[in-house]
């Protein structure tokens, strides 16, 4: 998969929802409802501007770069850990048979699994956990609801 592009839309790494639309819309392609100024802090203008932004600020002012940098358990820190791990996972992707609601694949010597269901689900055999979206998410061969994990492949 070398050369494949992976990207993050601005604000995804903070868990920001789509912003409210601008009035009038500034973007003829209709993307304005999906964008909002980046929220750097919880101050006036969200650290984005000292003036009036061309689009309204998002509704979740507590989700900002400053707050998430200070919280080791934040989504921003999870994104950073995932991006650092990505390069070391190895080449190639092979999708694995998995329970309904679970996306699982091998990449190099690792198994990556995401449980999109509301129930714990069995995941393909994996060894030592490398990263989890929440502590204890992968235990006893099951992945917690709405969680993900990366583990070394069992030999």
Image: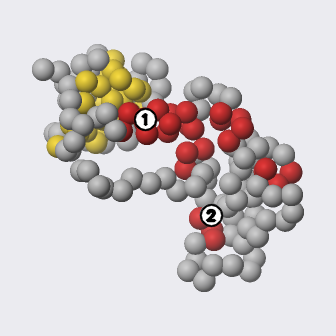
Q: Residue at x 29, y 55 (%)?
A: 3
Within 10 angstroms of label 1, few (less than 14), some, or many (20 or more) residues? few
Q: Residue at x 33, y 30 (%)?
A: 150
Residue 76 is left or right of residue 62, and the answer is left
Q: Which residue is mark 2?
A: 35
Residue 95 seen in the figure: no
Closer to the camera in the image, 145 or 80: 80
| Figure check: 141 above or below 62 | above
Tell me which corner region of the image, top left, top right, bottom left or bottom right, holds residue 90.
Answer: top left
- Residue at the outermost bottom position: 28
Residue 112 is left or right of residue 48, and the answer is left
Residue 106 is left or right of residue 72, and the answer is left
| Percent x, y of residue 85 | 38, 33
Helix, strand or loop under label 1: helix
Q: Residue at x 16, y 39 (%)?
A: 97
Q: Which residue is mark 1?
A: 84
Helix, strand or loop under label 2: loop
Q: Earlier in the sequence, mark 1 or mark 2?
A: 2
| Percent x, y of residue 78 | 50, 34
Q: Residue at x 29, y 17 (%)?
A: 128
| Figure check: 37 above or below 120 | below
Residue 24 is left or right of residue 82, and the answer is right
User: Looking at the rendering, in which quadrant would you find the C terminus?
Assistant: top left
């Amino acid at each position: 998969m070398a050369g494949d592009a992976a990207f993050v839309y601005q604000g995804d790494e903070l868990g920001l929802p789509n912003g409210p639309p601008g009035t009038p819309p500034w973007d003829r392609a209709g993307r304005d409802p999906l964008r909002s100024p980046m929220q750097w802090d919880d101050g006036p203008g969200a650290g984005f501007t000292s003036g009036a932004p061309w689009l309204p600020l998002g509704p979740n002012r507590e989700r900002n770069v400053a707050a998430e940098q200070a919280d080791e358990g934040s989504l921003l820190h999870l994104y950073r850990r995932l991006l650092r791990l990505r390069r070391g996972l190895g080449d190639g992707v092979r999708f694995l048979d998995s329970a309904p609601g679970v996306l699982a694949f091998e990449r190099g010597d690792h198994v990556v699994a995401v449980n999109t269901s509301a129930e714990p689900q069995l995941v393909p055999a994996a060894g030592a956990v490398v990263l989890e979206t929440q502590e204890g998410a992968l235990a006893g061969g099951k992945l917690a609801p709405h969680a993900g994990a990366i583990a070394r492949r069992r030999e």
